[in-house]
Amino acid sequence: MAIRNIRQEGDEILNKVSREVEVIDDKVKELIDDMVETMHKYNGVGLAAVQVGILKRIIVIDIYDEKTPIVKLINPKIIKQKGEREIEEGCLSFPNKFAKVKRPVEVVVEGLNENGEKVKIKAVELLAQALCHEIDHLNGITFVDIMEPNTLQYVEPQN
Ligand code: NI
C-alpha cells in the first residue's frame, strides 16, 4: 500500500469524466487500497480515483462512524434520491476551502465491490452527501462547480 499524491485545485484532470472499470484486476484492487490509505492519511471523508490522477470510476468513503463500514465502490450510480438540504462541503483537492451545496437527504447507490459483486447502498445525511460528492468527481464535477453563490470560504489551516 502507498500514499498517492492528491491532485489539487487548478489541475484540469479534476474536470475530466472517468471511465467505467471493465476488469477488476490486482491493479484496481491496489489502487483501492491506496485510495483508502490516502484518504485516511489526510483525514478525508472520501476520495475518487481521479483525485489521485486515475480516470476510473472508483470511490472510497469513510464517515468515521463505527457502525458504518468503509465504502469502496466501482462504477457507482445513484439510482434514487430523495429530499434536499443545504450543507457545508469541502474536498481534499481544495484544502481549507469550504462552501455550501445542495445535496439530497437520502440516496440509493448501486455499484460493484472489489470482488465484482453488485452492491446497493441506502444512505442518509453525511454518507449520502459523500456518495454524491464522490460520484460528482467521476463526472468531472467538483463542489466549487455546484456551490451556492457567495458561500466559498477559506479557513486558515491550524498547525
Ligand atoms: Ni472531493
Image (spheres, rainbow, N blue to C red):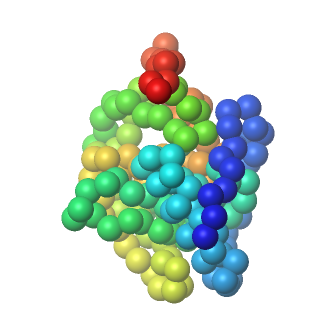
Q: Quadrant of ligand 1?
A: top right
Residue 19 in picture, x, y percent from top left: 71, 64
| Residue sitting nearer the eye, 62 or 4 | 4
Residue 156 in picture, x, y percent from top left: 49, 18
Q: Is residue 20 left or right of residue 72?
A: right
Residue depicted at 51% across the width and 46% down the height: 42
Residue depicted at 61% across the width and 39% down the height: 93
How many circles with numbers are drawn on the protein?
0
Q: Eyeballing the image, is 39 above or below 86?
A: below
In the rendered image, the residue lying farthest to the front is 159
Q: Is residue 150 left or right of residue 31?
A: left
> In what quadrant of the picture does the N terminus appear?
bottom right
Q: Eyeballing the image, is 154 above or below 137?
A: above
Residue 60 visible: yes
Residue 57 visible: no
Q: Eyeballing the image, is 112 above or below 131?
A: below
Residue depicted at 31% across the width and 38% down the height: 84
Residue depicted at 52% across the width and 39% down the height: 91
Q: Is residue 150 left or right of residue 16?
A: left
Residue 147 in picture, x, y percent from top left: 50, 27
In the rendered image, the residue lying farthest to the right is 12
Q: Is residue 74 left or right of residue 159?
A: right
Q: Eyeballing the image, is 124 above or below 89?
A: below
In the rendered image, the residue lying farthest to the top is 150
Residue 72 in picture, x, y percent from top left: 47, 68
